[in-house]
Amino acid sequence: MYTILKKEMLTPTICRMVVRAPRLAAAALPGQFLIVRTDETGERIPLTISDYDRDNGTVTIVTQIIGASSARIVAMEVGDAFADVVGPLGKASEFVGLPDEELAKKSYVFIAGGVGTAPVYPQAKWLHEHGAHVEVIIGARNESLLIYTREMASVCSELHICTDDGSKGFKGVGTAMLEKLVSEGRHFDQAVAIGPMIMMKFSTLACRKLGIPVTVSLNTLMVDGTGMCGACRVSVGGKTMFACVDGPEFDGYLVDFDEAMRRQGQYKTEETKAKEEML
């Protein structure tokens, strides 16, 4: 039974749940995802693994209400159980394979936007525990939409908070903060950007300008999560890749973001209709 042990609304539309899944927790690594189904007839929903606890046999998922299926997940309560929780799926973050002595010499910067902050957490936590220098930039439109700030502060060398309206931290977007840090003399060997597709596109452009290699996560493209439906096809370096089986993380310099954004919107009509029918 994949029972929900804890539930917390991080914002009015973003929910964090701790779910019992011992076998998945034992094998999970940063960058991977899982698939949940609320019931036997429910849609398969890919969600990035936001944390895992091997000792307690639990995984943490963060869901943002977008359509009908995500709304059904958020409507579940402590004590309820998912029909299925499958994973870990996808490839782990590339740095997982690096030895600690090499990680200790590296400096990473994460640019996290919105709900994309949740999958940044296990990556920053892993790197921090293995000796890397980690700085995290969290951006949101305003203070009320910020998530994981307390948790992130405990697993990074320095946390930088940005809001578009200046209600908390630096007034401006995450890329502006990155440029500010570099102008002040900070050096980063690798950047990781996770958030809305348009944010990752502009983060990649900023990193290219600054000469910083950047990894992006295309988990928001996934539908089936197994490579069978083809909905998450994306051009990476001129080759067709599938976010679910070849990723979800890719070299940002090589991703065709314009194509990815067109693909991301292809089911918007159906999603809107399903949500309206649910209401």
Image (cartoon, helix red, strand yellow):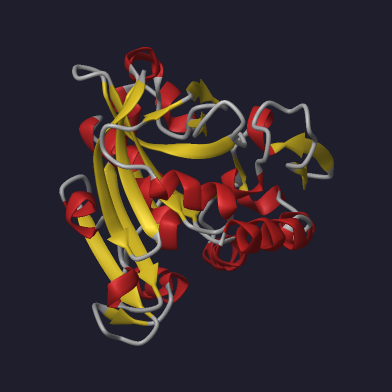
Residue placed at 59% from the left, 68% from the top?
Answer: 202
Q: Is residue 75 above or below residue 225?
A: below
Look at the image and tell me in which quarter the N terminus lies: top left
Look at the image and tell me whether residue 105 can be seen: no
Residue placed at 30% from the left, 86% from the top?
Answer: 166
Residue 152 in the figure: left or right of residue 61: left
Near-viewer residue (63 or 186): 63
Q: How many marks?
A: 0
Near-viewer residue (117 or 2): 2
Residue 257 in the figure: left or right of residue 114: right
- Residue 114, located in which quarter of the rendered image? bottom left
Residue placed at 26% from the left, 84% from the top?
Answer: 167
Residue 98: x %, y % from top left:
41, 24
Residue placed at 57% from the left, 38% from the top?
Answer: 45
Q: Is residue 173 above or below residue 115?
A: below
Residue 261: x %, y % from top left:
72, 60
Q: Is residue 279 above or below residue 24?
A: below
Residue 162: x %, y % from top left:
33, 74
Look at the image and tell me whether residue 44 can be seen: yes
Look at the image and tell me in which quarter the C terminus lies: bottom right
Residue 71 in the figure: left or right of residue 186: right
Residue 38: x %, y % from top left:
49, 34
